[in-house]
Image: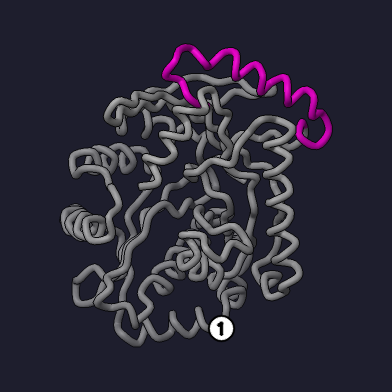
Amino acid sequence: MDNFFQSNVWKVINRDIYKKMLFDFEFLGKKYFGVIKEQSRRWLKIRWHQVLWIDATDYLRNYPEVFKKEIEKVKRDYKHNYWDIFFQFGFIDDLASFKIKELKDKKFVEDIKNRRKSREEIMKQEYWLLKSFRENMPLATIVVDLTGWEETIWTNMTKSARNHIKKATWHWLYFEFAKDEDWERFYDVWHETSFEKGFNIIDKETLLSLKNYLQRSSSWNLFLAKKDNEIISWSICLFVWKTIVYLYWWTNRNYWNIWAHHFLKNEIFKRWFQNWYHQADLLWAAPTGDDKHHLNWVTAFKHSLGGKKIEYLGNYDLVFNNNFYQAFKLIRSH
């Protein structure tokens, strides 16, 4: 699958738009870029390095001692001083890949859950890597194949999803690519939602810089579902090689019962199927079998669109300073 977190477009966004400190990183003979993060909280000043989308599958399966030596090298090379407290890896090793309909089998779900738990214990005991307390790379994703006929994409959705899309059409929803005036309205709504739900978003100036860069490079777009010229639902998607990456989305809660986002996703699939994209990566999904995961409600919607689910090995921290790491973990959980 196309590598979004190591793509050039994501590198440019982090370096030039978000103004993050990047570094080059070589691991098991492959080159990556990473992000250096710093934070000060009261008396605590910390720094950590993060590299996402690392493929270590072959070494973990066949050459574990080589993998272990590489981890030791990272600990030696990236603990520069007292404030470097951990190094975060995001591993894309494939724990499982399966069609969404497999999730109807409870034994299958339990097997995937146990498989993840077992691998987490191995990573801790054999390689000193702790499961990250914050997910900076998806633990799972859902990929919709866009290479088949349009009717195939439609029939692979659940019956309820197809009914939701039909219902949205009856409410006279229509699809549009965002125009300049839509961006202002979009940001105001996004900002209001973030304030109500308590999550952070980028400031408007950064968003407009991001918009200008990505539109110049034809790397993304903002897709809208509208009713009477009002934005009912939106999706921001990035285009990485032959993959459409589903990055952010929102739906107006005043119209929750007309299923606007099901309608919008279907319209995006239809258009990009016609533009010869191979797949749509819905990106963030809850790991199978984790009933308490914060993405469960989003994942239920994504499951309804059909396709294939991929379970990644996930996010792991190599801890340099355990006392500071535990203090930082406590602060970030509040």
* x 72%, y 35%: residue: 125
Q: Position of residue 76 (x, y in %)?
A: 60, 13
Q: Residue furthest front?
A: 323
Which region of the structure is painted magenta?
Answer: 59-86
As drawn, 248 above or below 298:
above
Q: How dense is the environment of label 1, judged by Cα within 10 Å: few (below 14), some, or many (20 and up)?
A: few
The residue carrying mark 1 is 159
Apparent side of residue 187 relative to residue 38 in the rendered image (left or right): left
Q: Where is residue 169 in the image (x, y as percent from the top left)?
A: 37, 82
Q: Where is residue 134 in the image (x, y as percent from the top left)?
A: 47, 44
Applied colour scheme:
one colour
Q: Specify whether residue 327 is in view.
A: yes
As drawn, 225 above or below 47:
below
Residue nearest the observer in this picture, 327 or 101: 327
* x 32%, y 78%: residue: 256
Apparent side of residue 154 relative to residue 259 in the rendered image (left or right): right
Main secondary structure found in the magenta portion: helix
Q: Where is residue 80 in the image (x, y as percent from the top left)?
A: 48, 12
Q: Which amino acid does label 1 sit on?
A: Lys
* x 35%, y 47%: residue: 334
Apparent side of residue 104 relative to residue 66 in the rendered image (left or right): left
Residue 44 in the magenta stretch? The answer is no
* x 52%, y 63%: residue: 292
Residue nearest the observer in this picture, 299 or 180: 299
Judging from the image, what secondary structure is the residue with disc 1 in? helix
Displayed quadrant of residue 91: top right
Apparent side of residue 312 relative to residue 299 in the rendered image (left or right): right
